[in-house]
Amino acid sequence: MALQSSEVFIGLAFVTAILVSFFLIPVIIRLIKKKNILDTGGKRKIHKGKKPTMGGIAIFSGFIFAVILWVPLGYVKFMLGAFSIIFITGLRDDLIPVRPVVKLISQLVAAGIMVGLCGVELTSLYGFLGIGSIPAWLGYPITIFTIIVISNAYNLIDGLDGLAGTIGILALSFFGVYFYLVGEAYWAIILAALVGGIIGFLFFNWEPSKIFMGDTGSLFIGFVLASAAIHFIDTNYYLSTNNTYRFTSSIGTAVAVIIMPLFDTLRVFISRAIRKQSPFSPDKTHIHHLIMRMGFNHARTVLIMLGIASIFQLVAIFIGYRLEENLMILLVVSMAMGCSLVLDYLIARRFPKKEAARKQFGRPNQARSN
């Protein structure tokens, strides 16, 4: 597809997805309220009262309609199969909680389709720790594991009105623009469609929200984001060194773009391990909880986190071109740890130590959390 014509299809997919998502949300809200399938607030959840969830139905519908309309079916048929498996898994989990092992099996199948049938795979460690090409028998499981980790990390940041949507738009837009510039037009159209679907949803999800995306949306978006990140890493590495849009660091640049969900999940898991709790036990130690504890409301907390994510993306854009893999990863991880330490320091300054510890690890007073 020529670069000029791809611009038209990218725009059409983007607008189509926005319109379908936007006009479908009110219908979904009415149906969910009629069926009384509502998310109840209280305890560890920020919102009060009952509110519709499963807004991801509109996101997925806008996305799938735009992709089928504007991308050749032969190119995306297996992708759509994988995306549909994840969507159905999230939808089922929102309706009736799915056992973790069932959810994991669904993710393994979907990730296996992306790797085995769609060519989304890590074929190398791209110079990280001095390691180059790796055999397929090793690359396949590493890729599947990476997709599952990123998907679930993204799912875990869906804790505030507008948070998962805005972080998703930022990261997906980076990869979408990149794919457009390097001639991966179909991937650019796919990601434009998802960004459009999320934007249509955000009209109803910004504080005070009328609906949540639920696992129906967050698992699906996380899965697409993970697939895009892996495809970026492999595509970028094998571009000609003379290509204007080639980043010197492939893994490090991708990590910088998706650092927010990755580091937040790692931080929470370490915190729970230190307290000898299950890494999957719900609590109030996510970064957005800590920012809110400093007195910020939903909207300002989301904007702060979006600002932090934007800084990392600027680092990816302006430094990923120059730094080799190991140095880039070291820089990104160091920046993330620095942000975490600054946040912990500000919390410690705001509250007495005992009170801060009680609020951070005890029984907090207002949060919807994963």
Image (cartoon, rainbow, N blue to C red):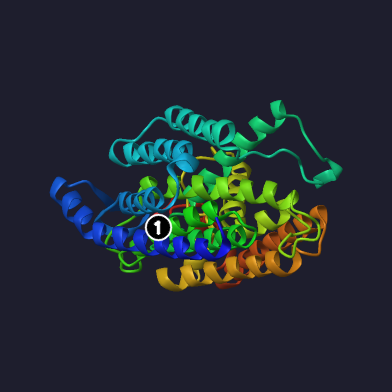
Report x, y in % for residue 183. Answer: 62, 57
Residue, far right: 130
In front here: 11 or 100? 11
Report x, y in % for residue 119. Answer: 60, 37
In front here: 301 or 144? 144
Q: Is residue 203 left or right of residue 324?
A: left
In front here: 72 or 156? 72
Quarter occupied by the N terminus? bottom right
Residue shown at the point (29%, 51%) measured from the top left? 53
Q: Secondary structure at mark 1?
A: loop
Figure check: 33 above or below 302: above
Q: Quadrant of residue 260?
A: bottom right
Figure check: 118 above or below 299: above
Report x, y in % for residue 353. Answer: 59, 63
Q: Is residue 207 left or right of residue 184?
A: left
From the image, tell me which residue sits under label 1.
Answer: 367
Q: Is residue 239 left or right of residue 199?
A: right
Q: Can the viewer see residue 366?
A: no
Number of dots carrying numbers: 1
Q: Residues within 10 Å of mark 1 (few under 14, many from 20)?
A: many
Residue shown at the point (74%, 50%) measured from the top left? 237
Identify residue type, mark 1: Ala
Residue shown at the point (49%, 72%) measured from the top left? 303
In front here: 99 or 134? 134
Report x, y in % for residue 182. Answer: 65, 58
Figure check: 118 above or below 153: above
Q: Quadrant of residue 116?
A: top right
Q: Can the viewer see residue 360?
A: yes
